[in-house]
Image: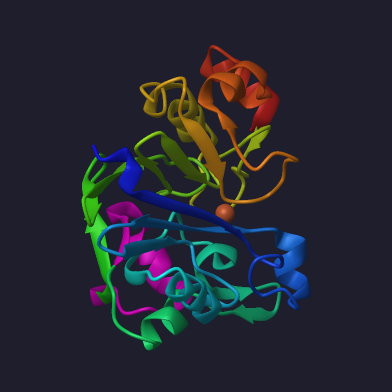
Amino acid sequence: MAPDRLLFRQLLAGRDFAIDDAMARSMANYSYLIADRETGEALVVDPAYRPLEILELAGREGLRVVGVVATHYHPDHIGGSLAGRSIAGIVELLGAGAVPVHAQEAEVSWIVASTGVGASDVVAHQPGERISVGALEVTLIHAPGHSEGSQCLLVEDRLLTGDVLFLAGCGRTDLPGSDPAQMYETLTRRLAAVPASTWVYAGHAYDAAATDTWAHVRETNPVLAPTTPAQWLAAFA
Ligand SMILES: [Fe+2]
């Protein structure tokens, strides 16, 4: 649907915003803007470190942020306390103007606990639900494993994977809410229907490339090689 209307921006913390923030530079988180270039409406995915700078970047492109999508609860993605430091995120963004925060239902209590955002500010979604931004539709794929309610976002030919999948690895499965067996299911089944030509956009810049095709990631990423849960758990859990 209306592919020419998608305006997509991959923003690297410590490079594109929060440039003087040493932690942002070392953590290398990506935030994303998904916008309808005709209506100017935008979703911001995983705003952290300097959420108001992300709003400014959107504003400079003539965009109005109408919602936030949280891939998962971790403070380097949506704000909260990490390694003795308070990271700005969704709470500060909402302070500049109330917009809904879209999350998987299974992640809502984690997000509230981690950020202190009001539960009523978070819209709880079921797996597979879609949200609209202008004429665009974003499908929310429940992708547990890194966290209970991690989600990947599919918008046209782009898949945003948060910390579920990196181009050459996957997210940790030893954190609160993690589940290695669920991660195997996510990687091999829940993401199986994604078209081969889809571009993968991860939650961190851990790889030299900014993106790669799902076909090439499937071929080269070692976490996608095992064909049984036992193999996967032995290698990566
Ligand atoms: Fe994470």
Number of numbered markers: 0
Q: In which quadrant will I find the N terminus?
A: top left
User: Which region of the structure is painted magenta?
Assistant: 101-120
Relative to 39, residue 113 above or below: below
Instruction: Please name the residue shown 64% across and 34% down the image.
Output: 167
Residue 230 x/y as whole percent: 57, 17
* Residue 176 shows in this picture: no
Residue 76 falls in image quadrant = bottom right
Q: In this view of the protein, which residue sits in the foreground, 81 or 29?
A: 29
Q: Is residue 79 left or right of residue 195?
A: right
Ligand 1 resides in the quarter of the picture at bottom right
Q: Residue at x 45, y 51 (%)?
A: 8
Q: Position of residue 13 (x, y in %)?
A: 65, 65
Q: Residue furthest top?
A: 227
Q: Main secondary structure of the magenta part?
A: helix
Q: Image quarter for residue 127?
A: top left
Q: Residue at x 54, y 42 (%)?
A: 201
Res. 41 visible in picture: yes
